C-alpha cells in the first residue's frame, strides 16, 4: 500500500518533469531548435495537424530552421500557421522549402524570457506540491481506513516529503540551466 502511494507520486513527478522539459524546449534561446515548432498546428485538408507530421524540420545552421513539406501544396498553409503562431519569426518561402531565421536575442528579450522561464518553473513546482498533497491525502485516508498504522503514516509522510524535495530540486536545476542558456550571449 505505502509503496503504491510513493510509486504513483514518483510517476506523476516524472511526468511533471517531462512536461517542464517540453515547455522549456519551446522557449527560444537564440538558437535553432526543431522543438520550437512542436506546438504549431497546420490546417491540412480541414484538420489541424502538427507541423512535424507534415514536414521534415532540419537545422542546417546554428540559427536557421529548414522546413521541407512532404506535400509541396501545403507550403502556404504551413507559412500561414507559422505567421499566426506566437513565435514572432517571419518565414521565408522559396516555393519548395521554408526557412526560419532565428534572430539573435536582445538583452531585454533575454531578461523577459528568463522571467518566463522562472514563471514556468514556479508553475511546475505548484504541480509538484499538488501531487504531494494528493499523496499525503491518500496516505491519511489509508490510515483512517485502518489499512496502515499511525507510525507507518508518519514514515510514509517523511518519504513523500523526501521525494517531493528531490522533485523540486530537479525543477530548480532545470530552471537554472534554462536561465543560464538564455542569459549567455
Image (tube, helix red, strand yellow):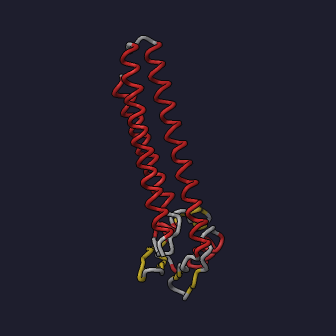
Q: Which quarter of the picture shows residue 86?
A: bottom right
Percent position of residue 97, x then y: 50, 83
Q: Position of residue 182 (x, y in %)?
A: 50, 68
Please identify the residue farthest to the bottom as the structure is shown. 94
> Can you see residue 133?
yes
- The reply to whether residue 53 is visible in this rendering is no
- Position of 140 with respect to 42 (left or right) is left
Q: Where is the N terminus found, in terms of image quarters?
A: top left
In the image, taking residue 115 as reference, residue 17 lies left or right, namely left
Farthest residue, direction left: 3
Relative depth, front residue between 184 and 35: 184
Q: Tell me: residue 139, above or below residue 150.
A: below
Asked whether 90 or 79 is in front, the reply is: 90
Quarter holding residue 110: bottom right
Relative to residue 65, is residue 159 drawn left or right? left
Determine the residue positioned at 58% across, 59% down.
Answer: 116
Toward the top, the furthest residue is 146
x then y, percent, for residue 137 = 50, 24
Q: How many marks?
A: 0
Q: Nearer the viewer, residue 88 or 110?
A: 110
Considering every residue shown, the one lying at the far right of the view is: 84
94 is higher (above) or lower (below) than 146: below
What percent of the width, then of the height, locates residue 22? 47, 57
Residue at 48 percent across and 81 percent down: it is 64
Q: Is residue 55 above or below residue 116?
A: below
Residue located 63% across and 68% down the image: 85
| Residue 146: quarter of image | top left
Amino acid at each position: 500500500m505505502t509503496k503504491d502511494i510513493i510509486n504513483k507520486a514518483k510517476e506523476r513527478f516524472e511526468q511533471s518533469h517531462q512536461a517542464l522539459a517540453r515547455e522549456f524546449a519551446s522557449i527560444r534561446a537564440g538558437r535553432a531548435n526543431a522543438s520550437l515548432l512542436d506546438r504549431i498546428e497546420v490546417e491540412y485538408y480541414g484538420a489541424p495537424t502538427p507541423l512535424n507530421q507534415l514536414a521534415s524540420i532540419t537545422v542546417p545552421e546554428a540559427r536557421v530552421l529548414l522546413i521541407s513539406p512532404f506535400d509541396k501544396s501545403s507550403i502556404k498553409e504551413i507559412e500561414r500557421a507559422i505567421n499566426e503562431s506566437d513565435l514572432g519569426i517571419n518565414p521565408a518561402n522559396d516555393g519548395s522549402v521554408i526557412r526560419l531565421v532565428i534572430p539573435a536575442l536582445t538583452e531585454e528579450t533575454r531578461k523577459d524570457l528568463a522571467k518566463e522561464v522562472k514563471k514556468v518553473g514556479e508553475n511546475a513546482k505548484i504541480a509538484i506540491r499538488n501531487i504531494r498533497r494528493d499523496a499525503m491525502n491518500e496516505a491519511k485516508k489509508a490510515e483512517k481506513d485502518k489499512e496502515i498504522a499511525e507510525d507507518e503514516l508518519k514514515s510514509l509522510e517523511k518519504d513523500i516529503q523526501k521525494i517531493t524535495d528531490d522533485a523540486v530540486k530537479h525543477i530548480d536545476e532545470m530552471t537554472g540551466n534554462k536561465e543560464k542558456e538564455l542569459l549567455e550571449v
